[in-house]
Amino acid sequence: MSGQCEQCKQPSTQKCSKCKLVFYCSADHQKEHWNEHKNNCRSYEICSNIELGRYLIARRNLEKGEIIFVDTPIVVGPRPHKIDRGPFPCVGCCKLLLDQMASCPECGWPCCDPECPDLKNPQRHSLECQVLKLRSFKPDGSTTSHEFFRFDVLIILRALFLQKTNIKKWEALLNLEDHLDDRGPKSDIFKSIQEKVNFLLENYIAPLKLYEKETDQTILPQASNDIIHKIYGALDVNATELIEPADLYVLYPIASLLEHNCAPNTCQTTNNLDYKVTFRAAVPIKKNEHITTTYTNILWGTQERRKHLKETKYFFCLCNRCKDPTEFNTFFSALICLGNDDEGCKGIQLPQNPTQDNPDWVCNKCNIKLPNGEISNFVEHLKKEVDKEIDKKPKLEELEEFLNKLEVFLHANHYLVYTIKHSLVQLYKIDGEIEISNGFLQDKLKMCQELIDLTKKLDAGNTRLALYLAVLLNEQFMAKFKQLTRDFDPENKQASEDLIEEITKILEENKNCLEYEKQLETGAKLLQVIEFNEMKFKQWIMENSINL
Ligand SMILES: C[S@@+](CC[C@H](N)C(=O)[O-])C[C@H]1O[C@@H](n2cnc3c(N)ncnc32)[C@H](O)[C@@H]1O
C-alpha cells in the first residue's frame, strides 16, 4: 500500500504507526506534521444519530487485540450508591479498610494511613477535605458512623471541583449524556437522588457558601441542586464501575461515547494506579463498523438485560442478540413447555418477538402461547431459588438434585441452569480419595464441553466471560489429564498422542484466555492454578519419556 506523504505530498509507503491511516515519507516529515495530525490520529470516528446519540465507528479495519484508545478518567471516586454498610474505603486511595482504619489528620474521615499519598492528591482527597472539614455536625453516640461518613458525597464533590481545577474535564463532564428528562420528579430514581442531593447541600454546600461569604471568595461557583442532579445523571449513565481494587465509579470522556451491545466487540483493561482504561478490539472490526461495549450482564437472558438497560440507561436494546429469540442458538432464555396435560409437551418455549414490549412465549411443538408477565414472574421465582441454593454452598448430590428439578422447567442452556452447572462442574472432583468411575469422568467432560461451547457462543470475543471460560477450561484440562493417566499404556504411547496434543492446546488456550484478566487479583490467582497444573502435566510427560 502506498499514498502521499501528508507533509510533502511525495509518494510514500510508510504509515503513521498509531492510527495507520496517513502516510509519511520520513520520520522528520511525520514530526513536522504532528501538530496538524495529532487531533486526528485515531482509528475511530465519533458519529451521531437520533437513535443512539453519539457513538464510535472504526475508521479502518481493526485487528483482534489492537488497541483502539487509551482513556484518562475525568473523575474517580467511591460508588455513590454503594457504601451504606460494610467496611469503609480509604477516603484517599479508596481501598477497603478491612484490617485497620486510621483517620485523615485534616478532616477525620476514615483512611488507610495518615500518610496515604492520595490524601494530598488534588484529584482525590485534598480539595474535598477542605469542604468535609466545614461540616458543623459531628458524630455522637446516637449516630452510626455510616450515617456520618456518607461516602456518596465524595465523587460529587470531586466532580464539582473540576470547574476550578480542570475546566476541560468539567466541560467534558457537562457534555455527557445525563438523561435528565427520564430522571425527573416522576421517575423511580428521583427520590433517592434528591435525598442524596439534599444531604450534600445541607451538610457540605451550605457551610461552604457561608465560608465563601465570610472569606469573600468563590470556591465552587456552580453547586446548585440542578447541577448536582446533572452530575448524578452523567455518572449513572456513563460511569464505569470497578470492583477491584475497590468499589469505584470512574468517568471517562471517550469510553462514555461507546454504544452498548449485548455481544460487544471490545474488551477493556484498567490500570489500578491511575485508572487509565485501554480498549482493544476483541474480534476483528471492519472499517465503518460500530465499536461497542456492554452496559449490562451478558450472563442474563434477553428480557432481564433489556429491562436493566431500560431502567438504568433509558433505552431499549435492539442488538442482534436481543432480536434473536434463540440468542445465537444458545437458547439462553428458553423454557421447557409443560403443555396442557399430565404428560407435558417438552417442546421449547421462546419469546415470539423478544424486542417487543411483553412478547408472547410460544412453544415450538404444541404452539401454546403464554404471556410475558407469567413467564417473567416464574423465572424471577426460580432465580430466587437458584440464589438461595448457591448461598447454601450445597454438596454435589444436593446441587445435582436441584439441577434436575430446574431442568423440568428450563432449557438445558438456560442462564439459570448455566449458573448451577458452572458450580456443579467444579464440584465434580476427580482427585478425591475415592477413585472416580469412567462414567463420572465422561459426565464431567460432557458438561465441561457443553458449557465451554455455550460460553464461546455468548462471548465470541472473550470480552466479559474470560474468567468463566478459564475455570471451565481448567476443569476440562483436569478431566482430560485424568483420562490420559488412566488410559495410558507405556507399551503403546502413540495411542495417547492425540489426547496429549489436545491437553496441550487446552492449556495454551487457557493462558491466552487470561491474557488481560491476569492483571486483576482473581485472574492472577486462577493463572497460578493453571500454571501449577501445567507443571504437573509436563512432569508426567517427562516421567513417561514422551517427546512432545
Ligand atoms: C454511555 S452513553 C453513550 C453515549 C451517548 N450516546 C452520547 O451521545 O453521549 C449511553 C447512552 O447512549 C445511548 N445508547 C447507547 N447504546 C445504545 C443502543 N445500543 N441503543 C440505543 N441507545 C443507546 C443511550 O441513550 C444510553 O443511555
Image: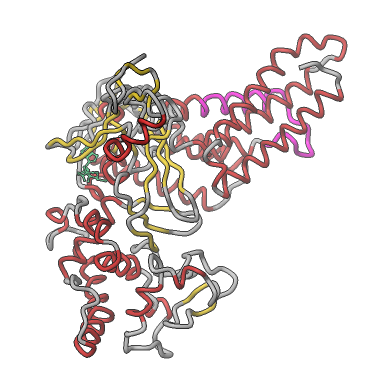
In the image, 285 versus 501, the foreground residue is 285
Looking at the image, how many numbered discs can be counted on the residues? 0
Residue visible at 32% across and 56% down in the picture:
74
User: What is the basis of the colouring in this image?
Assistant: secondary structure
Residue visible at 24% across and 53% down in the picture:
172
Report ligand 1 position as a quadrant. top left
Residue visible at 36% across and 83% down in the picture:
133
Q: Is residue 104 above or below residue 268?
A: below
Quadrant of the image containing the N terminus: top left
Residue visible at 52% across and 53% down in the picture:
391
The quadrant where residue 441 appears: top right
In the image, 496 versus 280, the foreground residue is 280
The answer to whether residue 393 is left or right of residue 480 is left
Q: Is residue 85 above or below residue 538?
A: below
| x and y percentages locating residue 257 in the rendered image | 26, 43
- Residue 111 forms part of the magenta stretch: no
- Residue 447 forms part of the magenta stretch: yes
Q: Which stretch appears magenta? A: 429-452
Q: In this view, does 447 lie above or below 95?
A: above
The answer to whether residue 34 is left or right of residue 231 is right
Quadrant of the image containing the C terminus: top right
The answer to whether residue 157 is left or right of residue 466 is left
| x and y percentages locating residue 538 in the rendered image | 77, 27
What secondary structure prevails in the magenta region? Answer: helix
The quadrant where residue 260 appears: top left
Q: Is residue 350 visible?
A: yes
The quadrant where residue 158 appears: bottom left
